[in-house]
């Protein structure tokens, strides 16, 4: 099974999102990565909902590339309308391609703060349970601060990949229920659909 994975930032693209997808049922999938902002992929301009249009355009692009499914993840970044727009794209019947679309609340970085055991193992020092990840105003800075105080020094993108490799998916789902919970369910469905076909 070949899946096109589209996301925003370098932290997702450097292994963290791949590790999460593999834990959610995609262990044997062939994952191809691209960025939401790829300038070759144009959503139609004009009035309307930008992320809905962009997500639907990525569905068209995924079909054009001949993949079996699309996984698309963006950050909410305090713009609540993104959740509604991506949900509409997830439910759209304009394209039949299996898909898992999600919005990380507030950002993907928050997911990295959900499991203190994974943080402790990745950073090589004891990390206390963090506040509600989806309520942290600047989770990227929170992660950077933990990394700066950790024993294992590495790039922040590597830190995220290491955390995602170790993270307990059930803990992540329960601590990030608005963003990760639905996204995880959609990703699991993509791989279950493939097994049935």
Image: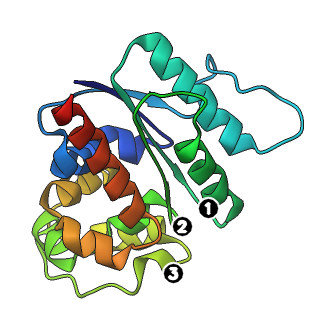
Mark nearer the N terminus (2 vs 3): 2
Q: Please name whichever residue, 115 or 26, is drawn nearer the observer in this view of the structure.
A: 26
* Local SS, label 1: loop
Reading the image, the residue beneath label 2 is 106
Check contact, mark 2 vs mark 1: CB within 8 A.
Answer: yes
32 lies above or below 117: above
> Does residue 141 lie above or below 81 as drawn?
below
Identify the secondary structure beneath mark 3. Answer: helix
| 71 vs 98, nearest the viewer | 98
Q: What colour-coding does the image apply?
A: rainbow
Which numbered disc, 3 or 1, marks the residue that appears first in the sequence?
A: 1
Q: Position of residue 172 (x, y in %)?
A: 28, 70
Residue at (30, 70) in percent of width and height: 173
Q: Which residue is mark 1?
A: 77
Q: On the image, numbered disc 3 is attached to which residue?
A: 135
Where residue 53 sits, quadrant-wise, is top right
Q: Position of residue 186 (x, y in %)?
A: 37, 50
């Amino acid at each position: 099974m070949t899946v096109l994975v589209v996301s925003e930032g370098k932290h997702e693209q450097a292994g963290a999102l791949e590790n999460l997808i593999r834990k959610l049922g995609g262990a044997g999938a062939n994952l191809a990565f691209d960025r939401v902002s790829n300038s070759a992929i144009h959503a139609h301009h004009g009035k309307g909902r930008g992320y809905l249009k962009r997500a639907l355009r990525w569905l068209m692009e995924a079909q054009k590339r001949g993949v079996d499914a699309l996984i698309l993840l963006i950050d909410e970044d305090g713009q609540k309308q993104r959740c509604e727009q991506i949900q509409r794209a997830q439910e759209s019947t304009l394209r039949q391609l299996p898909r898992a679309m999600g919005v990380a609340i507030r950002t993907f970085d928050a997911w990295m703060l959900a499991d203190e055991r994974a943080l402790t193992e990745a950073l090589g020092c004891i990390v206390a349970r963090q506040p509600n990840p989806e309520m942290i105003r600047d989770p990227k800075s929170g992660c950077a601060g933990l990394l700066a105080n950790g024993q294992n020094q590495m790039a922040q993108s590597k830190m995220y990949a290491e955390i995602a490799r170790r993270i307990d998916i059930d803990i992540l789902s329960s601590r990030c229920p608005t963003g990760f919970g639905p996204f995880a369910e959609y990703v699991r469905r993509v791989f279950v659909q493939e097994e049935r076909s």
